[in-house]
């Protein structure tokens, strides 16, 4: 778990969060830098509005050169920018920092931008302007236009980019430090939340799964939450309950099969042993051999029923669905049980709404269903009682009903009648039935996609009814 899902999840979340914070921090840095330079340019524009009247006054002869230089020096200190005054041809005629930029005096530095200035456009650049400066500078140039005389020069203000970016570097440091801190905190929170919400519950489920796999089928996951993990835990516990139920049924099945098989084998062994030991008189040997033969027949029926039920439920008994006459199948089956019917002096009433009624099914399997149900009806009917068999159509279904006059089924009988080896007389030693006939019937009809149900009919009998798809005429 820790090397698989958990590590992958933490890595994925960390990468997503880191990328998100990096993108946000990058965009924030770019925005702040743009905002900072915009504020700086607005400040330089205000400076230009103060310098412009001074420059115009000087060009008109109203101010001495020395006073002009003094004024530029004061403005440089106030606005923290080197100031150059350029005439309309691009030559520098005054500057604020003679010490460092004196070599630019009377030098033409405006070339490519002069045309834009003549149009009244403001120029803002970040580079080594025209090779005039040794280091990158932020250059802001405002044209001088007055009294409709056209372009008369420009005010150039330069600030070292390193000087401007000093406060920005501090801001960048704060932004990226906070981003790194946020990523670390987010990873820690994700780690603990993942441990609590996902990893530990999954470890509990995994632990219980191992316990169940080792045979401790009573173990359950104790997770109380309303999220997907909680739903998974509920589903897991439901699965565990199903496994426990299946295991209980398996043990009961093995116990029942063992008991059902042991009983005839014990009888056969006793009869044959008595004959071989001479305990049974010779004149009664044939009688006891016939009893042993009956027990062998009973054992054969049991094994055959088990094989049939196993094959049907595992899907290894393919169906050959064809058009079959259900009424004819019932007629033949009733005739087959004529001897048993006469032995119990039963009154059999067969009622069809039409002489021939065709449905869709596997003829051998449906015949097995009808045979088991009629055999069951005859077996549990009271002596001289009544057995009624009928068919009718309801929508696209054929309903086949088999009623016998017998003892009513209890609620417990109705609940467990489809269970393997269940017998309503609760007699495990009963030789009348293997207790597998009705489960086989239900399995065959389920494989056909049909239904079967049982109910107490009136006050004196039990009725089984199953459906069959009606064949298209």
Image: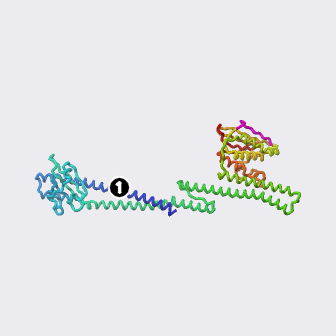
Q: Which of the colour schemes (rainbow, by chain, secondary structure, one colour) is used? A: rainbow
Above-or-below relation of 321 to 420:
above
In the foreground, 155 or 272: 272
Determine whether, in the image, residue 237 is placed left or right of residue 440: left
Query: For numbered disc 1, what is the local secondary structure?
Result: helix
Question: Which residue extends farthest top?
Answer: 354
List the residue tagged with mark 1: 27
Q: Is residue 324 visible?
A: yes
- At a point 29% along the width and 56% down the height, the residue shown is 36
Foreground pick, 12 / 436: 436
Q: Is residue 180 left or right of residue 223?
A: left
- Magenta part of the chain: 346-356
Quadrant of the rendered image containing residue 359: top right
- Tell me: residue 420, above or below residue 403: below
Q: Observer-nearest residue: 16 or 25?
A: 16
Q: Measured from the top left, where is residue 293 in percent x and y?
A: 81, 55
Horizontal side of 263 relative to 97 (left or right) equals right
Q: Is residue 174 magenta?
A: no
Residue 52 point in image, percent of width and height: 17, 52
Q: Residue visible at 80% across and 58% down? A: 268
Report if residue 78 is visible in the image.
no
Quick one: label 1, few (<14), some, or many (20+) residues within 10 Å? Answer: few
Q: Is residue 138 above or below residue 386?
A: below
Image position, residue 365 (x, y; %): 69, 47
Considering the image in quadrants, where does the C terminus appear? top right
Q: Position of residue 469 (x, y in %)?
A: 66, 41
How many numbered marks have been drawn onto this rendered protein structure? 1
Q: Quadrant of residue 67?
A: bottom left
């Amino acid at each position: 778990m820790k090397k698989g899902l958990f590590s992958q999840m933490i890595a994925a979340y960390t990468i997503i969060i880191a990328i998100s914070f990096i993108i946000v921090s990058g965009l924030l840095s770019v925005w702040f830098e743009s905002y900072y330079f915009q504020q700086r340019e607005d400040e330089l524009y205000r400076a230009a509005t103060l310098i412009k009247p001074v420059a115009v006054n000087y060009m008109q002869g109203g101010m001495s050169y020395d006073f002009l230089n003094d004024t530029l020096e004061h403005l440089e200190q106030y606005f923290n920018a080197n100031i150059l005054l350029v005439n309309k041809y691009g030559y520098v005629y005054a500057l604020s920092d003679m010490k460092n930029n004196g070599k630019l005096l009377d030098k033409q530095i405006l070339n490519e931008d002069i045309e834009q200035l003549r149009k009244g456009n403001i120029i803002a650049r970040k580079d080594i302007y025209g090779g005039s400066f040794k280091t990158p500078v932020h250059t802001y140039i405002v044209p001088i236009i007055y009294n409709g005389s056209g372009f008369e020069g420009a005010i150039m203000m330069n600030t070292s980019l390193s000087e401007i970016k000093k406060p920005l570097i501090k801001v960048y440091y704060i932004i990226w430090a906070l981003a790194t801190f946020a990523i670390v905190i987010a990873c820690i929170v994700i780690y603990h939340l993942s441990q609590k919400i996902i990893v530990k519950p999954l470890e509990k489920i995994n632990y219980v799964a191992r316990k169940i796999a080792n045979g401790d089928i009573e173990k359950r996951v104790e997770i109380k939450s309303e999220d997907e993990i909680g739903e998974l835990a509920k589903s897991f516990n439901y699965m565990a309950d199903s496994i426990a139920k299946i295991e209980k049924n398996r043990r009961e099945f093995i116990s029942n099969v063992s008991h059902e098989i042991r009983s005839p084998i014990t009888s056969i062994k006793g009869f044959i042993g008595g004959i071989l030991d001479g305990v049974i008189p010779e004149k009664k040997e044939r009688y006891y051999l016939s009893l042993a033969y009956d027990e062998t027949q009973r054992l054969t029926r049991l094994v055959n029923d088990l094989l049939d039920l196993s094959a049907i439920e595992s899907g290894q008994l393919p169906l050959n669905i064809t058009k079959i006459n259900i009424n004819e199948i019932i007629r033949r089956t009733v005739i087959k049980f004529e001897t048993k019917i006469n032995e119990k002096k039963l009154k059999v009433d067969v009622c069809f709404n039409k002489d021939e009624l065709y449905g869709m099914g596997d003829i051998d399997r449906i015949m097995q269903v009808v045979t088991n149900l009629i055999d069951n009806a005859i077996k549990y009917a009271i002596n001289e009682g009544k057995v009624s068999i009928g068919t009718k159509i309801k929508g696209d279904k054929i309903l086949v009903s088999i009623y016998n006059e017998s003892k009513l089924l209890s609620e417990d009988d109705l609940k467990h009648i489809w269970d393997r080896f269940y017998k309503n007389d609760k007699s495990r030693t009963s030789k009348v039935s293997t207790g597998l006939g009705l489960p086989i019937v239900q399995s065959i009809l389920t494989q056909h996609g049909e239904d079967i149900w049982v109910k107490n009919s009136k006050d004196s009998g039990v009725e089984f009814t199953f459906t069959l798809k009606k064949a298209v005429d």
